[in-house]
């Protein structure tokens, strides 16, 4: 991919019935192969249906890199100034601090490309939607390897995750994290608060831990884990925690992508193979592998029964420092 000249003039991109003016299109964002801001915008256009499905109607934190990913990162909760009137938002409240924020709420691909114009590389949505931000409709299973944990362990944990989901009658939708881990998403009925979703996620994580006790942990404190452990990070289901969306590019020099994959691919995949350079062709060939996720809705009640069982047996429910009070 040949980068545009660094001094290239602004370009106009037609996105549906919108036109987005992209300034500094030749600025290099990904130093490993020289992909530019314009390449990033073209990537999101190429995977448009997938990124919109992942973000639709969700509050979305933006990770912006105004000088490219080798420069400083801006964590942007509030919608950046200068948004056109058609860009939609959702107001979020943070009771612990008495604050609120109007976050981007994607309803069309043009909003994604406009965010790229504002130097956004990563999109981190909530696990709930605008209709009721306090009731998640997405349960997130985060298989998070410690620094010395080999990817073969991630593969085994993914197989155990699929096994438990199958026993529950739940459909899991895997994707790479864009780093060294793997995420699995499950659609759920939006009738529980974040605290109960997190309890259910912890009960599931403990079951995976029971099946791979020498490799998987649910130990919350990082200092108490082995550097070779695979941590099932149930806390990604806590209120206002966010994870990089399916199809989100990650802020590293290679431009890796959090890529939807099939369960059959997990045994052989290499996460670093999914980049802004390789994903457009894959998407054109396979389409959105998360198509159908909204129809595969799971009821968390069996997992809440597991949580109650574990709690009766004395298992603690760790609280992350700074977790908002949802009572």
Image (cartoon, rainbow, N blue to C red):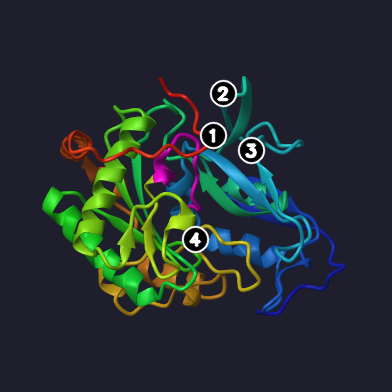
Q: Do residues under tags 3 and 2 come within 8 Å of each other at their CB atoms?
A: no
Query: Which residue is tagged 1?
Result: 322
Q: Nearer the viewer, mark 4 or mark 1?
A: 1
What span is in magenta? 235-245
Whether 242 is among the magenta residues is: yes
Q: Do residues under tags 3 and 1 come within 8 Å of each other at their CB atoms?
A: no
Query: Which residue is tagged 4?
Result: 47
Query: Which residue is tagged 2?
Result: 96
Q: CA distance from mark 4 to mark 2?
A: 37 Å
Query: Helix, strand, or loop for circle 2?
Result: loop
Q: Which mark is residue 276?
A: none
Q: Quadrant of the N terminus?
A: bottom right
Q: Do residues under tags 2 and 1 come within 8 Å of each other at their CB atoms?
A: yes
Label 3 vs 1, first from the N-terminus: 3
Q: CA distance from mark 4 to mark 3?
A: 24 Å
Q: Nearer the viewer, mark 3 or mark 1?
A: 1
């Amino acid at each position: 991919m040949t980068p545009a000249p660094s001094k290239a003039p602004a370009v106009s991109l037609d996105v549906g019935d919108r036109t987005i003016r992209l300034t500094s299109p030749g600025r290099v964002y990904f130093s490993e192969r020289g992909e530019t801001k314009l390449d990033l915008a073209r990537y999101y256009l190429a995977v448009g249906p997938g990124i919109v499905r992942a973000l639709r109607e969700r509050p979305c934190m933006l990770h912006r890199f105004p000088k490219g990913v080798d420069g400083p990162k801006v964590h942007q909760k509030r919608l950046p100034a200068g948004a056109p009137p058609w860009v939609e938002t959702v107001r979020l409240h943070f009771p612990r601090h008495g604050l609120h924020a109007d976050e981007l709420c994607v309803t069309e691909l043009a909003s994604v490309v406009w965010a790229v114009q504002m130097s956004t590389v990563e999109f981190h949505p909530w696990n709930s939607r605008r209709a009721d931000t306090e009731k998640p409709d997405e349960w997130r299973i985060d298989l998070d390897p410690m620094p010395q944990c080999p990817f073969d362990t991630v593969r085994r944990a993914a197989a155990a995750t699929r096994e438990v989901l199958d026993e529950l009658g739940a459909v899991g939708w895997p994707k790479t994290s864009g780093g060294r881990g793997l995420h699995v998403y499950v659609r759920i009925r939006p009738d529980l608060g974040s605290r109960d979703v997190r309890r259910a996620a912890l009960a599931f994580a403990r079951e995976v831990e029971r099946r791979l006790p020498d490799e998987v942990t649910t130990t919350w404190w990082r200092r108490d884990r082995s550097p070779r452990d695979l941590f099932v990070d149930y806390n990604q289901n806590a209120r206002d925690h966010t994870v990089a969306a399916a199809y989100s590019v990650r802020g590293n020099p290679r431009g890796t992508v959090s890529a939807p994959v099939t369960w059959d691919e997990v045994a052989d995949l290499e996460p670093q193979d999914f980049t802004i350079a390789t994903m457009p062709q894959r998407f054109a060939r396979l389409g959105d592998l998360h198509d159908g996720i909204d129809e595969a809705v799971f009821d968390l009640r069996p997992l809440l029964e597991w949580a109650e069982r574990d709690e009766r047996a004395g298992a603690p429910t760790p609280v992350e420092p700074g977790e908002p009070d949802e009572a």
